[in-house]
Image (spheres, grey):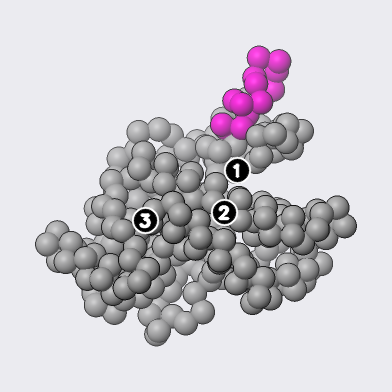
């Protein structure tokens, strides 16, 4: 049995994964693209207490190292196969849709050469970048062009359409109504600031000034204008909250369109009730 847990930030994926791992003799495979990297701790809500449950593909790369979806596909499949061979239950957890799809489905990675000409619009360039996992602000046209030249013409992998599932899995999705979720996201940002995110960000940008990961990760990239004395801290915090809320909406859309998700409402007042509902569903699905 393979269990996959999806959903946006703040719905309880980590807590649910630990409970299910204890119940089903499981090991957890990270499917969050940001938690791959060492030192991205506070801003990625990296699990602090694993409760003795083995976690895989967390903190495996430095911020000055490259790590592609293709790399993740190879690494995650090796981990997944090893867990299955040892008779344990793989529990895949994360919000990075492309990582999940690359692991579970028969996505083929091909190389595509495209020459930029006047017939290719900014929207088309942006769509291609999204296809390889790069979310660049659509309003930043110059950055889109630079990224497009670097990642498309330089033959970064592009995912084929209509994949075939390779690993049968029970996909559990956690969701919350918009007001509750947005409140949770906003509160999470405030808590990260209290927990020392500002110092973490300053230290990381000083240590890795050219890190592409830092420059593209929500809850880190928003600090760039602040560090350059172009924005106030209040501006940064508001932008973090806005970007996180927008990302949550995109995640729901992606999961609904690309994965066969069984959704459960997060009960913030009594999360044990949510766990019971998920466990009952899994037991009846086996």
Vertical comparison of 46 with 223: above or below: below
Report the front residue among 229 and 86: 229
Image quadrant holding the C terminus, namely bottom left
The answer to which of marks 2 and 1 sits earlier in the sequence is 1
Position of residue 206 relative to residue 125, above or below, is: below
Q: Which residue is mark 1?
A: 135
Mark 3 and mark 1 in contact (Cβ < 8 Å)? no
Relative to 80, is 215 on the left or the right? right
- Quote the CA–CA distance across marks 1 and 3: 23 Å
- Mark number, residue 158: none
Residue under the point 38% across and 80% down = 53
Q: CA distance from mark 3 to mark 2?
A: 15 Å
Which corner quadrant of the image does residue 284 belong to?
A: bottom left
Q: What percent of the width, then of the height, locates residue 227?
A: 83, 60
User: Which residue is disc 3 drawn over?
Assistant: 175
- Residue 37 pos. (x, y %): 60, 65
The tag earlier along the polypeptide, 3 or 2, is 3
Is residue 1 in sight in this rendering?
yes
Q: Residues within 10 Å of mark 1 (few under 14, many from 20)?
A: some
Q: Which mark is residue 244?
A: 2
Task: Between residue 111 and residue 124, name the one nearer to us.
Answer: 124
Examine the structure image and report whether residue 123 is included in the region drawn in magenta: yes
Q: CA separation, marks 2 and 1?
A: 13 Å
Magenta-drawn segment: 116-128
């Amino acid at each position: 049995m393979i269990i996959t847990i999806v959903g946006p930030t703040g719905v309880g994926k980590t807590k649910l994964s630990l409970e299910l791992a204890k119940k089903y003799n499981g090991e957890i495979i990270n499917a969050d693209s940001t938690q791959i990297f060492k030192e991205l701790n506070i801003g990625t809500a990296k699990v602090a207490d694993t409760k003795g449950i083995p976690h895989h593909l967390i903190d495996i790369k430095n911020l000055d190292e490259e790590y592609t979806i293709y790399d993740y596909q190879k690494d995650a499949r090796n981990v997944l196969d090893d867990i299955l061979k040892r008779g344990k239950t793989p529990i895949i957890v994360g919000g990075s849709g492309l990582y999940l799809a690359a692991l579970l489905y028969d996505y083929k990675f091909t190389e595509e050469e495209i020459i930029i000409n006047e017939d290719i619009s900014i929207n088309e360039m942006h769509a291609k970048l999204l296809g390889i996992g790069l979310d660049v602000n659509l309003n930043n046209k110059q950055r889109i062009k630079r990224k497009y030249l670097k990642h498309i013409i330089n033959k970064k992998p592009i995912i084929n359409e209509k994949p075939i599932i390779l690993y049968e899995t029970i996909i559990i999705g956690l969701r919350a109504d918009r007001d509750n979720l947005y409140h949770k996201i906003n509160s999470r940002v405030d808590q990260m600031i209290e927990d020392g995110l500002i110092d973490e960000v300053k230290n990381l940008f000083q240590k890795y000034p050219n890190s592409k990961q830092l420059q593209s990760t929500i809850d880190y990239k928003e600090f760039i204008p602040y560090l350059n004395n172009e924005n106030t801290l209040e501006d940064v915090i508001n932008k973090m909250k806005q970007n996180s809320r927008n990302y949550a909406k995109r995640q729901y859309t992606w999961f609904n369109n690309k994965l066969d998700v069984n959704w459960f409402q997060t009960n913030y007042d009594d999360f044990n009730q949510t766990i019971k509902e998920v466990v009952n569903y899994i037991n009846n699905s086996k």
